[in-house]
Image (cartoon, rainbow, N blue to C red):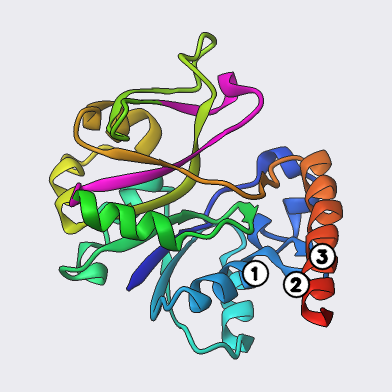
Amino acid sequence: MKAFLLVAGLGTRLRPLTNNIPKCLMDICGKPLLEWWLEKLESLGVESVLINTYHLAEKIEDFVADYDGEIDIKLFYEEELLGSAGTVRENRDFVGEDDFLIIYGDNLTDVDIRPMIEFHRRKKSPLTMGVMRMPRPETRGIAVLDKDGLIVEFVEKSPNPPGDLANAGIKVASPKLFDYLTGRKIPFDFGFDVFPKMTGVMYGYELSGYLQDIGTPSDLESARRQWAFIIEKEQQKTRG
């Protein structure tokens, strides 16, 4: 399996921290966020990952050059930000004819993605969106699911969201997704430009576990505290 790990954003809400360090390289309990994601994808059996770059791309290039994991890493530099769907659209050849993951790399999570992958394969849909109930739904993309998990409505960042079941930034897709990634719009965004047109076609899968966007300094500090607690719990389990 292959994966897109989308990390090219400017990290404007994290400034001045992101003036010299890209958001994906923020330290979380001794490792960059990007390293936590690469290790997670490796544990899932992902063989190859495409990482898009833009802001401080050379910092990410240096990190990848020093990374000694087993996963194959392809870097895709964007001269202008293409948007989440734009990056995927421009790299159709990367995924071939198999299912693949699309991950927003500015989240920190311990969510088990395997059941979602299995769900996606049963449904045989173009895309399955991981969703979670989250606070501040007006700041997020919100999905409405029917009893079978089909997404019947999707609204991106609305002042009056139709619920609190939010896009978790973790998706499983099949090559059929590219039928919906047409046109040349730049930037081309999943939330605003693609998902509203895929209602009635794509599915949602409710995830459980910890997930935190590190988009602001307070979110970053919260993530560091919570992750240290999660690590300690895992270590206690290992010790028995």
Residue under label 2: 31
Amino acid type, label 3 = Lys
Instruction: Answer whether residue 142 is magenta in the image.
Output: yes
User: Across the whole image, how many numbered discs are drawn on residues?
Assistant: 3
Mark 2 crowd level (few <14, some 14–19, many ≥20, 10 Å Cα):
few
Asked whether the beta carbons under mark 3 and mark 2 sit within 8 Å of each other, the answer is no
Q: Nearer the viewer, residue 238 or 181?
A: 238
Q: Hey, which quadrant is residue 172 in on the image?
A: bottom left
Amino acid type, label 1 = Trp
Q: The residue tagged with tag 2: helix, strand or loop?
A: strand
Q: Which residue corresponds to the image point at 78% horizontal and 73% vertical from the top-left?
A: 237
Give the farthest residue toward the top.
Answer: 160
Please, is residue 192 above or below residue 221 in the view? above
Question: CA–CA distance between discs 3 and 2?
Answer: 18 Å
Q: Which mark is residue 211?
A: none
Please, is residue 110 above or below residue 211 in the view? below
Amino acid type, label 2 = Lys
Give the farthest residue toward the front.
Answer: 240
Residue 225 in percent (x, y) is at 86, 53
